[in-house]
Image (spheres, grey):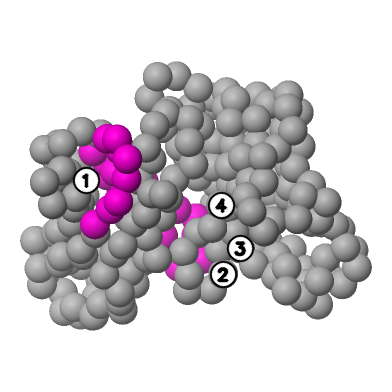
Amino acid sequence: GNSVTQMEGPVTLSEEAFLTINCTYTATGYPSLFWYVQYPGEGLQLLLKATKADDKGSNKGFEATYRKETTSFHLEKGSVQVSDSAVYFCALSDQGNTPLVFGKGTRLSVIA
Amino acid sequence: GAVVSQHPSWVICKSGTSVKIECRSLDFQATTMFWYRQFPKQSLMLMATSNEGSKATYEQGVEKDKFLINHASLTLSTLTVTSAHPEDSSFYICSAVLADHSYEQYFGPGTRLTVT
């Protein structure tokens, strides 16, 4: 079955540091890939997505590239801020109207 | 953008009582809604798929008689936790699928249920 594996946290960074959160997937076919963010006490918000190989999703300074050859969708940001502190979930959907398969989430804490 | 609401945002109930959680797509129609459950510091686990006008499809291990799902219209799905117990305490999140070719999912803000 489909699955998503993302690096375990928690991750603690200083403000303006570079962020990478690794995510790899296993799927049949050609899934769409997503990164969601969950701020404390809130629901999930879509951060970015990519629907086909070599697509780059980007939003709010975050970006991730759909790498079919390595089955990866790593999340990066060049300079994190305290307000980026949250839990980040990598997810996939293998076709239209299907539920998302989530990774376990990575908690990021950014300190000033 | 597409907005999904959940009501209530949090609820405390006593063991043995039932609680209904509503999930609404406010500005779009959703033929499919998903219900997830999230335990503290863990990922989201799919509970069931709710399709408008038909019975919900439950994931393995989810008791359909305990977690009643009704999807009566294209903008509303409800999850009723019947005879709640403390182990049902959790964060319940719904998502609604945009019924166009994008099939993009939009998540509600979640409902925190505490059973005492």
Residue position for label 1: A59
Name above or below for residue B71 compared with residue A21: above
- Residue named by callout 4: B46
> Which circle marks residue B91 in the picture?
3
Earlier-in-chain disc, 2 versus 4: 2
Q: CA distance from mark 3 to mark 1?
A: 27 Å
Q: Nearer the viewer, mark 2 or mark 3?
A: 2
Label 2 to label 3, Cα distance in Å?
6 Å
State whether residue A72 is above or below residue B70: below
Does the residue at mark 3 contact the one at mark 4 (Cβ under 8 Å)? Answer: no
The CA span between labels 2 and 4 is 12 Å
Whole-percent x, y for residue A104 in the image: 40, 65
| Element marked by disc 2 | loop
Residue type at mark 2 is Phe
Q: Residue at x 85, y 57 (%)?
A: B82
Q: Which chain's residue wears label 3?
A: B
Q: Image quarter for residue A55?
A: top left
Kind of residue at badge 3: Phe
Question: Which stretch did the figure color magenta?
Answer: A24-50
